[in-house]
Amino acid sequence: EAYGSNKEYAFNLGDIENAEKLHVFESPIDLLSYITIARMYDREWEQDAFLSLGGVSGAKSGTGIYKQLNRILSLGKNIEKVYLHLDNDEPGKNAAKQIVAQLKSKYNVINAPPKAGKDYNERLKMILKHKRERNNR
């Protein structure tokens, strides 16, 4: 992310205009890690849309994170579900609460942080480490 860049144009993947599900992450590496995990377990993901917020530091004032999210939601006319895959830390949890409050009247919002680890990149590393250890036995 370049200094002074327009925050409305964040890292995203997928066919936003036709997707019914939007997955939201704090960072591009978490987004890509989530997709890697989905591919490892043969989960379908190609029909969904994905957005990285580039952090949640603007969560308190409602600036920053909402610009990207609002732009993507305005383009995604078929989006019905929004999955929040934010970090398992205080800023991530606070941002998730704020986003749920903002969107719950229009979308089915699911708060889905990683089951273990701080974020999805750390979760992916844990899975890969476990697989290596199991293969070495």
Image (spheres, rainbow, N blue to C red):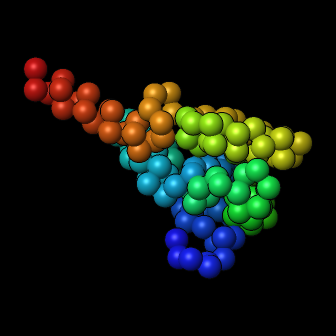
Residue 53 position (above or below residue 126)? below
Residue 112 is left or right of residue 109, and the answer is left
Farthest residue, direction top: 137
Image location of residue 128, percent across then percent down: 27, 36
Question: Could you tell me which residue is drawn at 48 percent across and 36 percent down?
Answer: 118
Residue 21 is left or right of residue 133, and the answer is right
On the question of residue 85 being in view, the answer is: no
Residue 136 position (above or below residue 16)? above
Image location of residue 84, percent across then percent down: 64, 42
Q: How many marks?
A: 0
Res. 110 image quadrant: top right
Of residue 25 and residue 64, the one placed in the foreground of this image is: 64
Residue 122 is left or right of residue 128, and the answer is right
Question: Could you tell me which residue is drawn at 70 percent across and 57 percent down?
Answer: 58
Image location of residue 79, percent across then percent down: 73, 52
Residue 22 is left or right of residue 106, and the answer is left
Question: Could you tell me which residue is drawn at 62 percent across and 50 percent down?
Answer: 24
Image location of residue 42, percent across then percent down: 40, 39
On the question of residue 98 being in view, the answer is: yes
Farthest residue, direction right: 105
The quadrant of the rendering that contains the C terminus is top left
Of residue 113 and residue 91, the one placed in the foreground of this image is: 91
Res. 100 image quadrant: top right
Question: Could you tell me which residue is drawn at 18 percent across and 32 percent down?
Answer: 132
